[in-house]
Amino acid sequence: MRKLLVVVVAAMLVVTAQPAAAEDVTTIWSGWTASPDTGAPFFYGVSANWVVPKTTCNKPTPTGVHDLYSSWVGLGAGEPMIPDWLVQIGVITSCGEVGKPNTPTYEIFWEAVDTSIPRKDVMPPQHTADFVHAGDLIAASVTSNNQGLWALTLDVNGKNQQKLQFTPSAEQKAKSTAALENYTAEVISESPVTLQQWPDFGSVTFINTQVITDETTKAWAPFIKQTALRVTDALTLANKKATKTGPLEPVNNSFTTTYLKPS
């Protein structure tokens, strides 16, 4: 789910025990993105844990659009805005299931996208229902290597529910105009229905946020220790903040995203 950047705020946020972070405001993302320094290795992994928040759905819009909300980890598609491949896995909350128009449904989802214009689905969005509920503990990760092999895993309450590997086919690579490198790593709350209302998810705290920057050692490093960080909040149709992303904290390598109720 490609981030749509609408405003870049020049101010720098300074948070104790972490580097200065640029601040973005987008229509759909709320969370933290890490970018490698110029000349530094790309990212080879990202992971985080969180509890699935209980979500309250809004009524559909006059045009029949229902709320969507997701929490996920991913590689690619952040800043810098260089066309690359976004590979992500997490939990998506849908408010538009047939027969349950305002009742949230929680599902595991994963996808891979070539973020060039026009966007191309390398691995179209996949959903797995009935394995996740509000209050469940999630552990999710995405890893890759220089040969283009991605591995996606997601555990629910300590039990693996999703594990897959894939390598883009020669045909997919031939059609792609995006780089195969992972320029960024993300831990994100998202409302992928662009320019629509966010459902009330309360708040979600991501802990144990980590990345891999060395393909040889495959050692996990705290997200907070990366030197190029960006914090993102989301906007509503009325151009007001829909979410608030808290600072990265050294305790548990954590941060919290919070839904802001309309005033």
Image: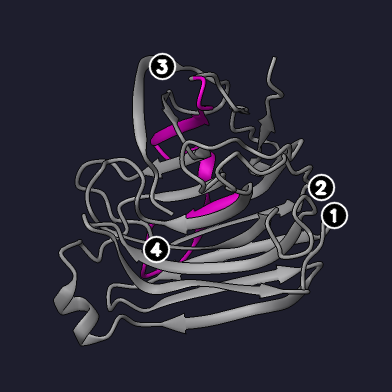
User: Could you say where residue 125 lies in the image, as x and y percent from the top left?
Assistant: 49, 69
Q: Which residue is mark 4?
A: 44
Label 1 packing within 10 angstroms: few (<14), some (14-19), many (20+): few
> Would residue 233 appear left or right of 6 to someone viewing this image?
right
Residue at horizontal 68 percent and vertical 25 percent from the top: 260
Give the mark nearer the N terminus: 1 vs 2: 2
Say which element carries label 2.
loop
Q: Which residue is mark 3?
A: 12
Give the mark nearer the N terminus: 4 vs 1: 4
* Residue 235 lies in the magenta stretch: yes
Spatial separation of the CA atoms under disc 4 and disc 3: 27 Å
Say which element carries label 4.
loop
Q: Which residue is mark 1?
A: 135
| Cβ atoms under marks 1 and 2 closer than 8 Å | yes
> Would residue 63 appear left or right of 53 to someone viewing this image?
left
| Cβ atoms under marks 4 and 2 closer than 8 Å | no
Say which element carries label 1.
loop
Please, what is the three-letter code of the amino acid marked with disc 1?
Gly
Please, what is the three-letter code of the amino acid marked with disc 2?
Lys
The tally of labels here is 4
Q: Residue furthest front?
A: 62
Give the mark nearer the N terminus: 4 vs 3: 3
Q: What numbered label is drawn on residue 54? A: 2
Give the mark nearer the N terminus: 3 vs 2: 3
- Camera-near label (1 vs 2) is 2
Residue at horizontal 68 percent and vertical 57 percent from the top: 96
